[in-house]
Amino acid sequence: MTRRRWIADTWDEATASLTGNQAGHLIRVLRAEPGMEFDIVAGGRVWHSVIAGITGDSVRFNLIAEVEADPALPVTLLLSVFKFDRMEWAIEKVTELGAARIVPVIARRSDKHLAQAATTRAERWRRVAVEASKQARRSDLLQIDEPLPLKTALRAEENAVRIVLAEQERSSTLRHALSEALIAAGDEVPSIRIAVGPEGGWTGEEEAMFDAERWKAVSLGPRILRAETAAITAMAVAAALLE
């Protein structure tokens, strides 16, 4: 039987603990008792664990043995802030598909009210990622950075394969660009950064910024996709090539 998986709030070399909502659910809904066995994600590793004790709203586990698990894919999505319900759905799905990190970015066409609220919303996005990580039985937790201006975000990780989804691009597809990058990397698995634009797309000024920083513009095909669809599709293409 597959054991249910939890993501530890705190841990050391021999033990791990759940607190807050996770512990509350385990105690009150699943009626946790000492001796019950679960898988625990702690420090990017998965452990076969047994409940050692329950104190208030905290559940402590003894870590018994490490369980073999696949790491996240080396993909970071620069996700322009868009409508929060759709953005949460995109975060959930790219987490399930194995993305390592999301950098929320403020683009020129990002809604001003959403952009202003993005910093306070980031903690909710992280909770969405935690739940999606558990559901997908990941061995790690997708990281969500604090929102950044696009100009700042696109300058990071100059050695990564850096790709921007661009509506006007038709000659080069994401799949082709990633395939070429993987062939060029040989036995190494490169870090990949994919930028997804806001509703309305990138402005001409932003496209020039990407060009100046040597990001490769690619297409997802002839159809115009919503931002959340583009993010999920891009991650699915990357996962298909990397796994």
Image: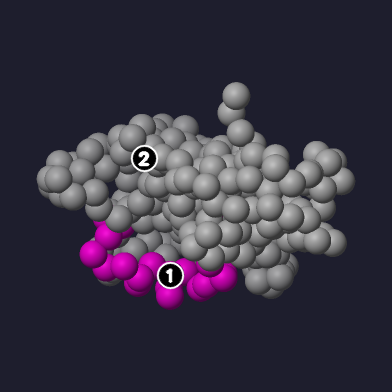
Q: Position of residue 54 (x, y in %)?
A: 78, 56
The residue wearing badge 1 is 153
Task: Say which quadrant the N terminus sits in.
Answer: top right
Pick the front one: 128 or 20: 20
Other-residue count near label 2 (Cα within 10 Å), few / some / many at <14 / 14–19 / ≥20: many
Q: Position of residue 187 (x, y in %)?
A: 14, 45
Q: Residue at x 64, y 53 (%)?
A: 61
Left or right side of 225 for 71:
left
Mark 1 vs 2, N-terminal side: 1
The residue wearing badge 2 is 238
The span from disc 1 to disc 2 (Cα, nearest Å) is: 20 Å
Disc 2, SS: helix
Instruction: Point out the stretch of residues depicted in magenta.
Output: 141-162
Q: Residue at x 76, y 60 (%)?
A: 58
Q: How many marks?
A: 2
Left or right side of 197 for 59:
right
Residue type highlighted by circle 1: Ala
Q: Nearer the viewer, mark 1 or mark 2?
A: 2
Left or right side of 89 for 162:
left
Disc 1, SS: helix
Say if the magenta span includes residue 144: yes
Q: Is residue 173 above or below residue 107?
A: above
Pick the front one: 69 or 167: 69
Q: Is residue 161 above or below residue 98?
A: below
Say if the magenta span includes residue 214: no
In the orientation shown, which residue stands out farthest toward the top? 1
Residue type highlighted by circle 2: Ala
According to the image, what is the colour scheme of the structure?
one colour
Q: Residue at x 37, y 61 (%)?
A: 207
Other-residue count near label 1 (Cα within 10 Å), few / some / many at <14 / 14–19 / ≥20: some
Q: Position of residue 68 (x, y in %)?
A: 41, 40
Q: Position of residue 215 (x, y in %)?
A: 29, 59
